[in-house]
Image (cartoon, helix red, strand yellow):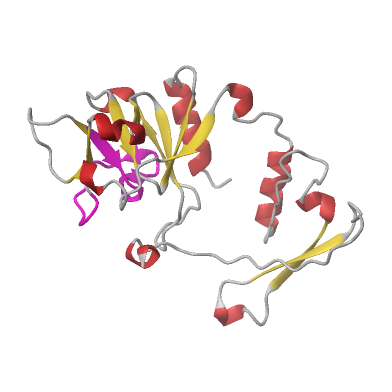
Amino acid sequence: STFNRDKVLQETVIIKGKRKEKASPNHNVLVSSSQGLKDIATPEIKSFKQIELIDLSSNEKILYLPTSDFDESILTVFKNWNGNLNKYNIQISTGPVVAFRNREFIQDNYENGTVFLAPLFWLHNVKQMTLEWPISKPEKGQYVRIEHGSKAILIPNKNYILLRRFSTKDDKSRLIAAPYFSNFLKSDYIGVENKVNYIYRPHGYLDRNEVIGLCALLNSAL
């Protein structure tokens, strides 16, 4: 399968609930976690007030599932922040290049002067705080042809943060982000594969400090 080929670590979350007319924000919620089959019979169990895990009066209704004391401390830090990406005119999108649909535009080798090519960044190109490109891998072409039919899957060449959408079994971090700067190479466009997210400013440009700062935060232990 795709997940096995890319060595993607899959995690499962099981939620059990019972519908009520109105749940109290102080209702107790149990969160249990295990590392796998070896300890599934003796999971770690933590108790929280519902309001600590989800604010049903908020617009986003984000569900938090802390499974350790460290997770709880991170959650405390996050809840003291009052900013968000939208506040700073920053957005996140998923890479538009879907390999099996766009194979006609993807190629392995650079052709000097014969066709116009944009770099294509896959999950394996994104390392902590750095981009490694090109990296030759079977069926992971490192270029996208720039032509009329492919422009819908390309994005303008400007400063971005590239963020892996999945963790692999070998990754020590849940989030892995790399800075991309527009002077990486000369091209009007770049390609981002569908397993990679990109963070950008829609109406403007991220400056270098913003890119490096957000990358450092995403790669941190938080």
Which quarter of the picture shows residue 170? Answer: bottom left
164 vs 19, nearest the viewer: 19
Could you tell me residue 214's position as x and y percent? 51, 32
Residue sitting farthest toward the top: 204
Could you tell me residue 202's position as x and y percent? 49, 23
100 vs 118, nearest the viewer: 100
Please state the extent of the stretch shown in magenta in the rendering: 118-140
**At x 68% / y 40%, what residue is drawn?**
78
* 53 displayed left or right of 103: right
**At x 39% / y 46%, what residue is drawn?**
194
The answer to whether residue 57 of the structure is visible from this angle is yes
**At x 71% / y 41%, what residue is drawn?**
60
The answer to whether residue 134 of the structure is visible from this angle is no
* 15 displayed left or right of 125: right
Which quarter of the picture shows residue 133? Answer: top left
Could you tell me residue 213's position as x and y percent? 49, 30
157 vs 33, nearest the viewer: 157
Q: Is residue 20 above or below residue 122?
A: below
**At x 21% / y 47%, what residue is drawn?**
141
Q: Is residue 91 above or below residue 16?
A: above
